[in-house]
Image (spheres, helix red, strand yellow):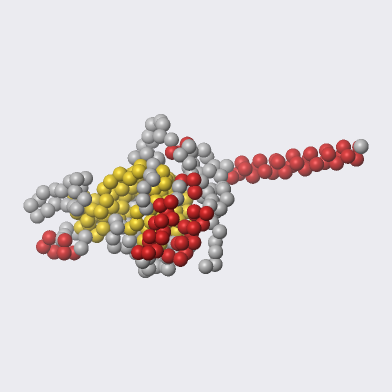
Amino acid sequence: MKMEAGLVEQRRDIVEHVNDRVISKKKVRRRPSSLPLKRKIPVCLALQQLYSCCKKVFKGPGFVPPPQDVQSLCTILDRMKPEDLGLSRDLQFFKTEGSVKENPRVKCTTIYKCQNFSLVLFFLPASAVIPLHNHPEMTVFSKLLLGSMHIKAYDWADPVAVENGKQPSPLRLAKLKANDVFTAPCNTSVLYPTSGGNIHAFTAITPCAVLDVLGPPYSKEDGRDCTYYKDSLYASSDGKLIDLKDNKDSYGWLEEIDVPEQSKMDGIEYLGPRIIETAN
């Protein structure tokens, strides 16, 4: 009996020691409650399908996916739900009660990244802004998972659209492609190197979560650095300013600017479903 009691006591000590280690490990990994991510969860079929499709679709720098591949990716993204990435409307981040902070910062986390493509999640508090910026030589799929946001997007105008072949330097003429509010769930938007609204800006109406698929990713070393712009109304030959809010076929002057303060983001650890990398 004394031997059995000793064994029981020894086992109790081992269990308490293991529990102490587990608790300590959890304390190290605990994230602040304000972050819009839950704990790590197992593999998600939808995310794994997205990864596999991206591996087949994106071939590297200079490659633009053909229409059938674009449709394949859009089909997968259109079906994705916040829960597929470990998100929930019940998370504190997405609750709109309380006052809106002044100049709230955007948070981002990289789900996966390789030379050919990357999967990135952006979290925008209400009134947060991702300033007007471009995606050089990139094809980008954006899926709004949660919330409502205003999107303004431009493409560079064809040279013949510039009256008399002149435009004031350092301004460059761009055609407005989007100037609307989008609310999840909605279809995936796609931009291309020279079309689809390659230069865009996001303004969160409510707290938002956006999944971006970038092919290829930004790379300063490879000439794909992010450039920021400010826009102004386009004046026609009679000097009349066109209201961009009322005219989707209008133009604007874009001027390159230094990296704005609003573009700075807080990187956070990705705690959603993991991706299993495959050889093919």
Q: Is residue 268 above or below residue 214?
A: above
* Residue 250 shows in the view: yes
Q: Nearer the viewer, residue 147 or 239?
A: 147
State the residue at coordinates (9%, 55%): 237
Residue farthest toward the top in the current orientation of the protein: 98
* Residue 265 shows in the view: no
Q: Is residue 48 above or below residue 59?
A: above
Q: How many marks?
A: 0
157 vs 275, left or right, is left
* Residue 43, percent from left and from top: 56, 53
* Residue 149, percent from left and from top: 34, 44
* Residue 51, percent from left and from top: 48, 59
State the residue at coordinates (49%, 58%): 49
State the residue at coordinates (21%, 50%): 248
* Residue 150, percent from left and from top: 31, 45
State the residue at coordinates (45%, 47%): 81
Residue 171, quarter of the rendered image? bottom left
161 vs 262, left or right, is left
Residue farthest toward the left in the current orientation of the protein: 238
Which quadrant holds the N terminus?
Answer: top right
199 vs 51, left or right, is left
